[in-house]
């Protein structure tokens, strides 16, 4: 992959020259709800449109081997959507779920630049306060990082970086070139500011950005961002230049909002086009989430008793890979995490199916015999490395010895919406195991697997070595991108039970998975006719395949059970939904901040539902939240300005575990319902820091000498109470190892200018009466991020000054010398030593000389006066 250009801004100059002043945008669709700016563009609008455009570009130029080619005429003048682009090219081979999820990752990362504490007020990341050179340098480094993540096939992290880059590019039209002393704006006291940019700036084709808030301080005559939340607009030059919205209430340059949006869109498309050229079409499509399904992922026990299970995993993997070879699309990844007495790992992750088969073929079941094992450690590793909306298959015959990881595993399952299924070749009712050590074990030792499978929407299948081959066929059943859940129930009741499940006109290939202590069952269609279907039983696990076409309406299944059992009903359908929870954010750039993890009880929450494959004649109108042990709460879904995007004001999040389902009607008025495959769980802990709180810590990551650039490492961070009362809070971050960075052009403190002096000898109570200051320039292409005073006291500030950054330091003579630590945006440190000028000895001598002369003069006057007075008295 090449890095094709040394600067990003020159590529965008064509777009920038058309508009003077800043043009940022509000974050996402919820911004329009909060601010009533329905006719305005947001970062979400621009990002989605750019992603759809580059997807269409690729597919227009990439001929499908069996389907008619796409034609531009079929899309020209129409609103682009994921459905009409991908379905026109791939038909039913592609996952709309994966594409929409990937797009939302990019959009969410873009919006977070306006929400997160570390970025929302950073002028360099938003090209505010004339931080042009530094912002450009930050963009270049972000692009380098993006290419590193793509090369490492860490597409999730790459989407985050891409969202950050697109946010900056959509604001980069604010760039400026005038020196710090140049006036850029004139006063404007109206809500709509016409012609408030200085004419000389426009004549020289220089573009300016507005200062925002109190930091950095706006120099006299500079432009403000403007709007109701901008403190700086009250000082010269008053008013503002932002084009965030199409209304003067928020944007002084509202009349240029449409032009600004079109220029930002062109800049975004141009960047994606250049990126496509550098990484090729295949990687670009993976980055955008165009795939059949995200991953084929295994966690495999490789102890000596697992020979048959490893063979079954090989056979099913070959079957899936061969099936996908007949299409254009294959999984993004093939993932394997082995575990073996007493360890686990490493992660084997590849996009090459042949390489994955070679890895599987190299596995051997050797040694072992201990029970339990590190199953959850291996599963956690697989969850971290598996993309969202995938399914992980765990093969084992041992219970888990690392149950303390349960909360973090559950949180990862919910965050990434991954199904986890377990194939266990051991009868849980036994108290001895087939391994070499005949240990006595608890009959409930596999309950943690059952709970994780239930929470994730997966299954637990208890089988034997003889039946593992047939039982493992559930891998093939699940390896379809359009699997949807109709019904799930886990119960310990005995006797007769009846369950109802809804079949709609969009469903086909419905399969029932019945597991556990089931004596018998009968299935009935909506008219009461018994349906047998095609059945396949393996021990206590039975699959029932219903024959298409199916009667639309409420079906029922009656079971006779003697103990714990579960039933899952799923089918294939193009109609499905995605969802996420968010919290409204007010302020200068209002919007909806997506929660990556669990929703928090007591926090105002909005549920966003993105319906996939919804025909024009159908609608989804309600959402059900059902606690595991509680009553269902039904909420009304409200439409937004985007097709298929619906919202519900949740109010109170259910405490504990709950399920989520959406419902509506088809074109004939028949009910349609879809269930989220995973159960949700509200957060049991939240780490919150107030604005005045801070805690610094150093994290050192030591890697082996043989770790190559491009290797992905995962950093896990946990926070827990000292009393150990609350559950552990945790988060994780994936990092890509990069080449060693050397600072070729070190930052330089250039010739400080001093003002004021400090006398050589001052009493402690006198030093506060004398002040001094220093002003100097810093040459650093990356920009100064922060300044710390290492010794003494005083105040330091910094800002842009053309090609340099200026630094001002002021203190009393109680701190006659100090050292400043300057950190740039590469986290490279620069030390600058400053010392107050001392009053020179020559100056002091002159002062003493003048004082002596004055005193002598006074004495002469006094003596002369006394003489004259004495003489006058003598004469009288």
Image (cartoon, grey):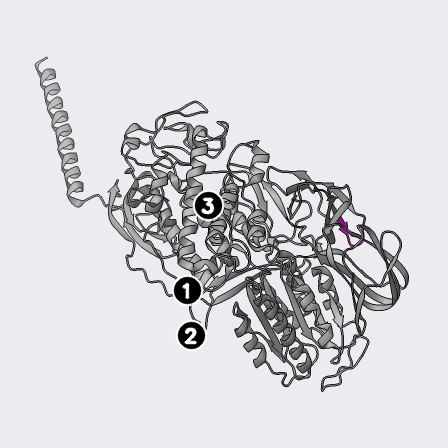
Quarter placement of the N terminus: bottom left
Which label sits on residue 167?
3
Q: Single out the mark in the foreground, 3 or 2.
A: 3
* Residue 606 position in % (x across, y down): 65, 43
* Residue 103 position in % (x across, y down): 54, 50
Q: Nearer the viewer, residue 131 or 592?
A: 592
Mark toward the start of the polypeptide (1 vs 2): 2
SS at badge 3: helix
Magenta segment: does it hold 628?
yes
Q: Nearer the viewer, residue 517 or 476?
A: 476
* Residue 290 position in % (x across, y down): 54, 56
Label 3 crowd bin: few (<14), some (14–19), many (20+), radius 10 Å: many
Q: Is 486 drawn above or below residue 393 in the view shown?
A: above
Task: Quickly name the residue at label 2.
Answer: 705
Q: Is 682 drawn above or below residue 79 in the view shown?
A: below
Q: Is residue 3 visible?
A: yes
Task: Quickly name the residue at label 1.
Answer: 738
Q: CA distance from mark 3 to mark 2?
A: 37 Å
Which label sits on residue 234?
none
Q: Which residues are magenta?
A: 625-630
């Amino acid at each position: 992959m090449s890095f094709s250009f040394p600067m990003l801004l020159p590529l965008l100059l064509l777009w920038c020259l058309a508009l003077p002043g800043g043009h940022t945008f509000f974050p996402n669709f919820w911004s329009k709800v909060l601010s009533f700016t329905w006719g305005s563009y947001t970062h979400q609008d621009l990002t989605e449109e750019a992603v759809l455009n580059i997807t269409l570009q690729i597919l227009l130029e990439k001929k499908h081997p069996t389907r008619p080619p796409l034609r531009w005429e079929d899309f020209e003048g129409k609103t682009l959507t994921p459905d009409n682009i991908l379905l026109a090219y791939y038909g039913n081979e592609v996952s709309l779920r994966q594409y929409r999820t990937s797009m939302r990752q990019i959009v969410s990362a873009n919006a977070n630049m306006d929400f997160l504490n570390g970025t929302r007020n950073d002028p360099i990341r938003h090209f505010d306060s004339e931080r042009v050179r530094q912002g450009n340098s930050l963009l270049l480094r972000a692009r380098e990082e993006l290419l590193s993540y793509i090369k490492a096939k860490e597409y999730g992290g790459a989407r985050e970086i891409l969202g950050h880059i697109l946010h900056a590019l959509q604001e980069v039209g604010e760039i400026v070139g005038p020196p710090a002393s140049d006036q850029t704006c004139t006063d404007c006291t109206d809500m709509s500011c016409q012609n408030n940019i200085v004419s000389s700036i426009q004549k020289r084709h220089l573009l300016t950005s507005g200062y925002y808030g109190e930091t950095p301080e706006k120099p006299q005559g500079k432009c403000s961002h403007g709007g109701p939340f901008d403190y700086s607009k009250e000082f010269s030059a008053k008013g503002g230049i932002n084009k965030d919205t199409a209304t003067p209430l928020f944007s002084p340059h509202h009349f240029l909002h449409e032009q600004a949006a079109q220029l930002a869109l062109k800049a975004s498309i141009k960047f994606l086009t250049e990126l496509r050229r550098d990484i090729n079409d295949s990687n670009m499509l993976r980055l955008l989430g165009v795939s059949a399904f995200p991953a084929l992922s295994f966690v495999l026990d490789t102890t000596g008793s697992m020979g048959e299970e490893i063979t079954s995993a090989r056979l099913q993997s070959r079957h899936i890979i061969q099936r996908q070879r007949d299409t254009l699309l294959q999984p993004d990844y093939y993932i394997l995490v082995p575990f073996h007495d007493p360890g686990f790992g490493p992660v084997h992750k590849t996009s090459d199916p042949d390489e994955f088969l070679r890895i599987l073929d190299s596995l051997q079941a050797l040694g072992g015999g201990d029970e339990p094992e590190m199953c959850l450690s291996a599963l956690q590793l697989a969850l971290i490395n598996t993309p969202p909306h995938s399914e992980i298959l765990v093969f084992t015959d041992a219970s888990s010895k690392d149950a303390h990881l349960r909360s973090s595993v559950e949180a990862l399952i919910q965050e990434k919406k991954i199904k986890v299924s377990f194939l266990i070749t051991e009868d849980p009712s036994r108290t001895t195991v087939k391994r070499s050590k005949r240990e006595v074990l608890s009959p409930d030792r596999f309950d943690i697997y059952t709970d994780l499978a239930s929470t994730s929407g997966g299954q637990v299948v208890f089988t034997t070595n003889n039946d593992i081959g047939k039982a493992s066929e559930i891998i093939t059943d699940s390896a379809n991108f359009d699997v949807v859940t109709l019904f799930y129930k886990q119960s310990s009741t005995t006797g007769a039970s009846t369950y109802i499940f809804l079949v709609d006109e969009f469903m086909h290939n419905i399969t029932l998975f019945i597991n556990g202590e089931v004596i018998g069952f009968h299935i009935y269609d909506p008219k009461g006719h018994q349906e047998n279907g095609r059945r396949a039983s393996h021990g206590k696990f039975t699959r029932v395949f219903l024959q298409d076409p199916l009667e639309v309406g409420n079906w029922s299944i009656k079971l006779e059970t003697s103990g714990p059992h579960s039933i899952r009903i799923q089918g294939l359908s193009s109609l499905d939904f995605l969802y996420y929870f968010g919290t409204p954010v007010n302020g200068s750039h209002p919007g909806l901040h997506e929660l990556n993890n669990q929703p928090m009880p007591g926090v105002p929450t909005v549920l966003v539902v993105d319906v996939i494959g919804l025909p024009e004649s159908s609608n989804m109108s309600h959402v059900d939240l059902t606690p595991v042990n509680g009553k269902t709460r039904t909420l009304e879904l409200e439409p937004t300005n985007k097709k298929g995007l619906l919202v519900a004001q949740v109010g109170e999040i259910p405490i504990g575990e709950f399920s989520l389902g959406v419902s509506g009607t088809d074109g004939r008025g028949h009910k349609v319902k879809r269930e989220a495959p995973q159960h949700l769980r509200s957060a049991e802990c939240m780490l919150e820091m107030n604005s005045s709180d801070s805690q610094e810590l150093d994290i050192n990551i030591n890697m082996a000498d043989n770790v190559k650039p491009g290797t992905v490492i995962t950093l896990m961070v946990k926070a827990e109470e000292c009393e150990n009362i609350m559950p552990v809070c945790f988060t994780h971050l994936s990092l890509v190892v990069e080449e060693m960075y050397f600072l070729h052009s070190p930052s330089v403190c250039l010739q400080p200018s001093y003002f004021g002096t400090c006398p050589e000898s001052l009493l402690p109570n006198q030093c506060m009466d004398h002040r001094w200051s220093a002003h100097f320039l810093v040459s650093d292409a990356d920009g100064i991020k922060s300044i710390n005073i290492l010794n003494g006291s005083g105040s330091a500030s910094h800002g842009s000054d053309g090609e340099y950054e200026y630094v001002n330091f002021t203190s009393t003579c109680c701190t006659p010398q100090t050292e400043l630590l300057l950190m740039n945006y590469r986290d490279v440190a620069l030390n600058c030593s400053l010392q107050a000028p001392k009053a020179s000895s020559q100056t002091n001598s002159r002062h003493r000389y003048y004082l002596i002369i004055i005193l002598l003069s006074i004495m002469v006057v006094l003596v002369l006066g006394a003489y004259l007075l004495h003489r006058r008295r003598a004469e009288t």
